[in-house]
Amino acid sequence: MGSAIEAINLTKYYDDLLAVDHVNFEVEQGEIFGFLGPNGAGKTTTIRMLTGISRPTEGTATIIGYDIQRRSVSAKEQMGIVPDVSNVYKDLSAWDNLVFTGKLYDMPKALRESRAEELLKMFGLYERRKEKVKGFSRGMKRRICIAMALMNRSHILFLDEPTSGLDVQSVLIIRDLIRKLNQQGLTIFLTTHNIEEASQMCDRVAIINHGKIATIDTPEKLKRTVESLQSVEVAFEATPQNALKELEELPQVSEAVKQGDKFRLFTRDPSSVLASTWNYAQNNNLKLITVNTVGPSLEDVFVKLTGIKPATAEEEPEKMGHGKAQKMTGRKEQQ
Amino acid sequence: MKDVHSSHLGREIRVAWAIAVKDMRTYYTQPPSIMFGILFPFSLFLSFSIGRNLPLVTQIPILVSQTLFFASSSIGPVVIPIERADQTFDRFLTSPVSLLAILMGKTLGGIIYGAGISIIPVLVGIVFFGSQITNLGALIACFALSSLAFSALGIMFASIPGQTVGQVMMPLNFVRIPLLFISGVFTPIRELPTWMQAVTMLSPLTHTVELARYSSGGETFFGPLVNIAVLTFYAAIFLFMGIRFHTMNQRKE
C-alpha cells in the first residue's frame, strides 16, 4: 500500500527561529498515525505545512502523491482538517456550515445536501440542524467541525487535538468515530497531548521535540525500548507523611513518584523492590492495599525522549508566585 | 485541455460566489459593518450638509460617493480579521481553491454591500426630491468601478495581520478620511488652486464624485473618460497589491 502522507526535509523558519528542522516521515494509507510532542515542539507548524496553510522554508510534503505546494488543489481535495480550535461559522446553522463546506469543495447541490444530512444524522445533530452553531456546546461544535472535515469524502483526516477540553461522553463518541472511519479505510493523522489516547488508538506514533523527529515506531515497540523504566506501584491504607522520601531510599529504587494516593517506584529490579516494600510496610505497621508491577508506558517513552521532567511542571507555579508548591517527586543517583 | 481550464475557472467562480454569499449572510449585519459602512458616511454627510444652504438634489451625488467609498471598503477589514481570530480563514486556505478565488469572493462581498447601500440615496433622491438620472451609463460605471476599487482597497488593508477589526480599520481610516478632503467633496474642484486640482486628480474618490454628479446632469472637471480610466487603474492596482500582500502573508505563516 502506498504512502498517504510523505514529509521530505520539511523545514520552517520564523525569521531566525527554527520551528521545524528537516522533518522526514511517511504515513501509510489506512493507518492511524499519532504525532506527539510537548508544547512548542513544532507539531502545529508541521500540520500547517502538511495542509497547505503555511509554506515550508525548505523541503516539501506530498498528499496521496500530490505535492502540497505544486499541486495544492489536487492535494487539498484528498484531505479533511479538524484544527485544534473548532473553527465553525458560529452565526450559521449546523446545516449551513456543512453545505457551505460542500460549496468550497465545489460539490453539486444534491450531493452536498445528501452528504450533510448523512453526516448530521451520524453525529446525532440532525434534529438541531437549523439552529445557529453559537448556541451549541463545545462537544457539539467539535462534532460539527469533524463533520465539516468529512464532507468531501476525503482520504486523509488531519485531527489536531480532537478531544482536548471535551467532556467524557464527547471524547468517547469522537474516539469511537475515529476508529470507525479508520476501519472504513480513512488515513488518520492525529496530533494529541493525550499520550494514553495515542497509545490506544495509533498504529504508529512519531515524537517530535525541538522541531526534530525524536522517534517513529509502534507504541508497543517504543515501550520496549525503555524497559529500564519498569516500576512497582504501591498504595497504603494510611500514608505516612514522609513515605515518599523513605520509599525512594529503598534499595534498587531509582526514583519515587507520588501519583494521587499511590506511589510509583521506578527500578530495574521489580522483584527486589517488591520485597523491600513489603519489609517497609511491616516495619512501619502499614497495610498495603495495592501492589502492582507496571511496565513502561508510552508516556514514559515520551518523557524520556523529550527530556521533560516533573520538576519542570513544579517550576511553573513558582514562576507564578506559588513558591510553596509541594514537592511530589524524589530522585536519587542511580545505585 | 480547454475543458480542464474552463472547468477550473468555473469552479473558482462558483467558490468565490459561495464565499461572497456566506459573507453577506454572516457579516453584513455585524455592528462594525453597520458602523463603518453606513453610519460613518451618513454622519459625515450630515455634518457637512446641515447648515449649508444647498439644494438637496445637488448633495445626493456626494452622499452616494461617500457611501460607495466607506461601505465598499469596510467589508474586507471587518470580515478578514474576524475570520482570522476564529481561524475560519484557515478553512479557505485548506480548501481546494486558489487564494485569488478566495480574495475575489471577499472583494465581491464588498462590492455588493457598497453598491447595495449606495443605491438607496439614489432611489430616495429620485422618488422624494425629484433628482434625475440623465446618464445611466455613467451611473453604472460609477457604481461598478468605484465599488470594485474601494472593496479591493479594503481587502488590501485587510492583509495587515491583525485579529481585531480595529487593527485594520484604524490604518484604513488614516487613508480614507484625508481622501475626503482632497476629492472635491466639500469644495468644487474648479474653485481650487491649480496645484490642488492636480492633487485631487490622484484621489480615486474624486472620480467617483465626478461620475455621480455627471450621471445626474452635473458637470465633471476631468471628464467622464478620465474618471473611468483613473477608477479602472486604481481598481487594478488595489486588486494586484491586495493579492500580493495576502500571498506574502501566507509565506510568513
Image (tube, rainbow, N blue to C red):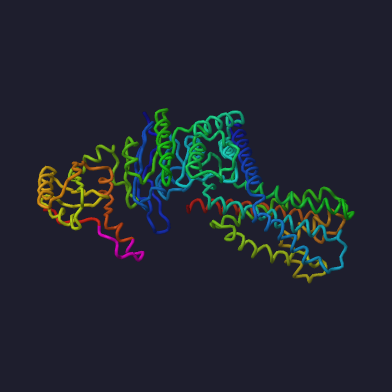
Task: Name the side, left or right, on which A302 lies relative to B23.
Answer: left
Is A136 contained in the magenta span?
A: no
Q: Residue furthest right?
A: B130
In percent of width and height, residue A332 lies at 16, 56
Q: Position of residue A214 (x, y in %)?
A: 29, 47
Determine whether A248 is above or below B93 in the image: below
Q: Would you say the magenta stretch is mainly helix, strand or loop? A: loop
- Return the residue found at the far bottom: B193
Q: Residue at x 71, y 62 (%)?
A: B202
Q: Is residue B88 left or right of residue A12?
A: right
Q: Position of residue A85 (x, y in %)?
A: 47, 47
The quadrant where residue B233 appears: bottom right
Q: Nearer the viewer, residue B164 or A162?
A: A162
Is residue B227 shown above or below A193? Answer: below
What residue lies at 78% left-to-right and 64% top-to-bottom?
Answer: B46
The image quarter in which residue B191 lies: bottom right
Name the residue: 67% across, 55% down. Answer: B73
Extent of the magenta region: A317-327
Seen in the picture, residue B50 relative to B248 is either above or below; the reply is below
Where residue B250 sits in the image (x, y, percent)? Answer: 51, 51
- Identify the residue shown where x is 36% and y is 45%: A9
Say whether residue B94 is visible.
yes
**Front-most of residues B194 and A272:** A272
Which corner quadrant of the image does residue B81 belong to?
Answer: bottom right
Q: Is residue A88 left or right of residue B223?
A: left
Quarter in which the N terminus of chain B is drawn: top right
